[in-house]
Image (cartoon, rainbow, N blue to C red):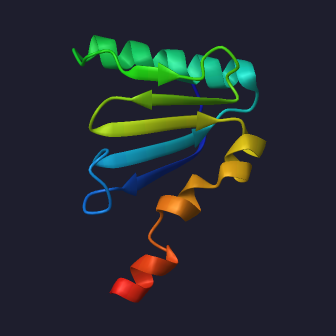
């Protein structure tokens, strides 16, 4: 579905919510919806349980929670606003102090 700017963040040791977070962008709401729907279908075809899905009606930001992996699909300006990479990435100030 040609998701853009895909980032994978390892969450092991950072939280018990999931093992990894994937963040990707779609160009417009319909692209975000298409990427999300394709991911849901791919998970189904792989025999995985249906993910918990949030945000499909508006498609500014869709969250797919598969249990082990959390997937965020954003429109670019929404992604920039929430900046999850900074929040969960390895350059977090508290992590630098703890190391």
Q: Check the picture and name the quadrant holding the N terminus.
A: top right
Q: Name the quadrant containing residue 28.
A: top right
84 w.r.t. 46: above or below: below
Q: Check the picture and name the quadrant holding the C terminus.
A: bottom left
Residue 66 percent across, percent down from the top left = 33, 29
Residue at image location 33% in from the left, 19% down from the top: 43
Give the side of residue 80 with respect to residue 70, left or right. Answer: right
Residue 49 percent across, percent down from the top left = 25, 16
Residue at image location 51% in from the left, 79% down from the top: 93
Give the side of residue 99 with respect to residue 21, left or right. Answer: left
Residue at image location 45% in from the left, 28% down from the top: 64
Q: Name the quadrant containing residue 50.
A: top left
50 w.r.t. 21: above or below: above
Give the side of residue 53 with respect to residue 73, left or right. Answer: left
Q: Nearer the viewer, residue 22 or 12?
A: 12
Residue 62 percent across, percent down from the top left = 57, 28
93 w.r.t. 45: above or below: below
Q: Nearer the viewer, residue 95 or 33?
A: 95
């Amino acid at each position: 579905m040609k998701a853009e700017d895909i980032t994978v963040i390892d969450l092991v040791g950072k939280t018990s919510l999931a093992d990894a977070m994937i963040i990707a962008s779609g160009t417009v709401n319909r692209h975000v919806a298409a990427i999300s729907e394709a991911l849901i279908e791919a998970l189904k075809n792989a025999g995985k349980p249906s993910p918990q899905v949030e945000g499909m009606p508006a498609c500014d930001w869709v969250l797919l929670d598969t249990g082990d992996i959390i997937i965020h699909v954003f429109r670019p300006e929404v992604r920039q606003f929430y900046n999850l990479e900074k929040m969960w990435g390895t350059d977090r100030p508290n992590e630098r102090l703890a190391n």
